[in-house]
């Protein structure tokens, strides 16, 4: 622990995954006596202050006339682009991935003057970014810069691993064609963004990368899923086997009719905005003898649960997963790593971004099952549930892995790296 009281500025992406990751690490640093300031997006106003942090927030676009829920921009974006998720990952490069980069870049450009002003006001000793896009003000602040990768670590590319966003198998099938299509659909966008980054006084971006490496780099992924053998990382990189926040409210399991196993079902705050998909999965789960806790998400009023289910718009995920026997997830990095932190098998139904990569990795390492999100047959989902719940050897293996992941204590390891960098 540092003897000096540090001022640490966090800037997470305005989605629940990166923000919750930073909350977990920031809470450890705050309890060690450091001053922790969040330059989060403005829709988080009051949410971070309630957890003991300072807020000095930014707008990523002209402010909305009405107050928005945290991360509302991305909820709306995902809802509007949901029809594209039925396409292959290669087709999504042009219709989902590139538009996401464009929106992120627009936000970075819009808030650059605000960030410079925040850095002047706050006077940080270290800056921590959990995002996939560069904010030049963060790397030109004149203090150490920490990059956090809280998406699947294929974000850190290498010749021995599949290209990010592809969900392709580890045997190399389709890699070259996917990379060529990524180059075709993204090079012009990347080149223009890198030129703008340089104009702001920051270093040019590496080829086809949208964010700089840090003086220290953290990534969140359990060793049992990691790609370290195929793509070793340099000494500036530290793996956090998990980064599970300790700020979720306590949870008392409600009475749910049924005698079967307890299953947690969540497509994340963004994926659950696809109400049609949520309803279809719920209708299948209703046919099983098991009990379900459902994270209903922002459009919760449009989602009706079956009698063997309980759910709410928001649920304290880190308190629920330990109680569950199985997790059905979209494959977001937070849920994937949290499920393994608590030693639970998964069924993964990916939608976009790195969720396909997590789904493939869970499947090929035997930690669960990947299904075709929009094309699965009812009996495939029911069969996967029964198979995973009945695999005692797998459940024992994952329980032991969870114990080791918890022992490694990623939150405090991350706090140590940030302190030592200063």
Image (spheres, grey):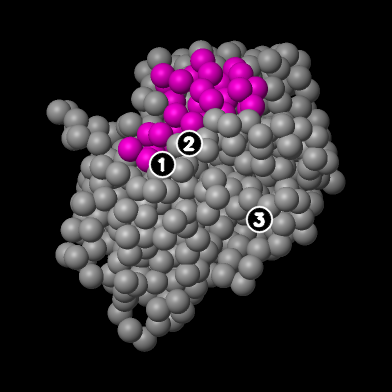
Cα separation, mark 3 vs mark 2, equals 34 Å
**What range of the chain is rendered magenta?**
78-106
Q: Quadrant of residue 395?
A: top right
Check disc 2 and report its element: helix, strand or loop: helix
Please tell me the numbered disc located at residue 222: 3
Position of 235 compared to 378: left or right? left
* Disc 3 versus disc 2: nearer the observer: 2
16 shown above or below 6: above
Cα separation, mark 1 vs mark 3, equals 35 Å
Q: Answer yes or no: do the residues labelled 1 and 2 have beta carbons within 8 Å?
A: yes
Was residue 224 drawn as part of the magenta stretch in this picture? no
Please tell me the numbered disc located at residue 192: 1
Please tell me the numbered disc located at residue 188: 2
Percent position of residue 201, x then y:
32, 60
216 shown above or below 59: below
SS assignment for the magenta stretch, majority: helix
Give the class, few, some or many, for how many residues have Cα within 10 Å of label 3's Cα (few <14, many ≥20). Answer: many
Q: Residue at x 23, y 70 (%)?
A: 123
Of residues 349 and 302, which is closer to you in this image? 349
């Amino acid at each position: 622990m540092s003897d000096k009281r540090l001022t640490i500025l966090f800037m997470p992406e305005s989605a629940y995954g990166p923000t919750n990751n930073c909350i977990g690490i920031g809470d450890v640093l705050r309890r060690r006596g450091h001053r922790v300031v969040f330059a989060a997006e403005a829709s988080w106003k009051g949410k971070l202050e309630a957890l003991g942090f300072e807020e000095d927030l930014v707008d990523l676009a002209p402010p909305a006339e009405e107050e928005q829920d945290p991360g509302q921009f991305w909820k709306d974006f995902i809802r509007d682009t949901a029809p594209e998720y039925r396409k292959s990952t290669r087709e999504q490069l042009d219709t989902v991935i590139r538009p996401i980069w464009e929106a992120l870049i627009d936000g970075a450009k819009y808030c650059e003057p605000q960030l410079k002003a925040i850095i002047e006001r706050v006077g940080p000793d270290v800056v921590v970014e959990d995002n996939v896009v560069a904010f030049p003000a963060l790397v030109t602040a004149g203090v150490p810069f920490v990059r956090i990768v809280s998406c699947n670590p294929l974000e850190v590319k290498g010749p021995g691993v599949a290209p990010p966003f592809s969900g392709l198998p580890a045997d190399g099938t389709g890699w070259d064609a996917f990379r060529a299509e990524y180059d075709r659909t993204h090079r012009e966008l990347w080149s223009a963004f890198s030129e703008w980054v340089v104009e702001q006084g920051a270093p040019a971006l590496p080829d086809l990368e949208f964010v700089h490496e840090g003086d220290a780099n953290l990534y969140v992924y359990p060793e049992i899923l990691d790609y370290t053998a195929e793509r070793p990382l340099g000494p500036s990189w530290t793996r956090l086997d998990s980064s599970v926040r300790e700020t979720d409210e306590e949870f008392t399991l409600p009475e749910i009719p049924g005698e079967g196993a307890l299953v947690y079902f969540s497509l994340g705050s963004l994926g659950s905005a696809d109400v049609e998909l949520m309803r279809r999965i719920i209708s299948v789960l209703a046919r099983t003898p098991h009990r379900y806790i459902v994270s209903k998400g922002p459009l919760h009023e449009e989602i009706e649960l079956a009698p063997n289910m309980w759910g709410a718009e928001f649920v304290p995920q880190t308190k629920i997963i330990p109680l569950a026997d199985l997790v059905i997830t979209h494959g977001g990095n937070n849920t994937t790593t949290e499920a393994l932190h608590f030693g639970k098998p998964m069924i993964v139904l990916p939608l976009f971004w790195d969720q396909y990569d997590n789904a493939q990795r869970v499947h090929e390492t035997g930690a669960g099952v990947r299904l075709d999100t929009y094309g699965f047959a009812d009996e495939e989902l029911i069969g996967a549930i029964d198979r995973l719940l009945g695999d005692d050897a797998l459940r024992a293996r994952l329980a032991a892995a969870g114990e080791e992941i918890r022992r490694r204590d990623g939150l405090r390891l991350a706090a140590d790296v940030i302190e030592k960098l200063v």
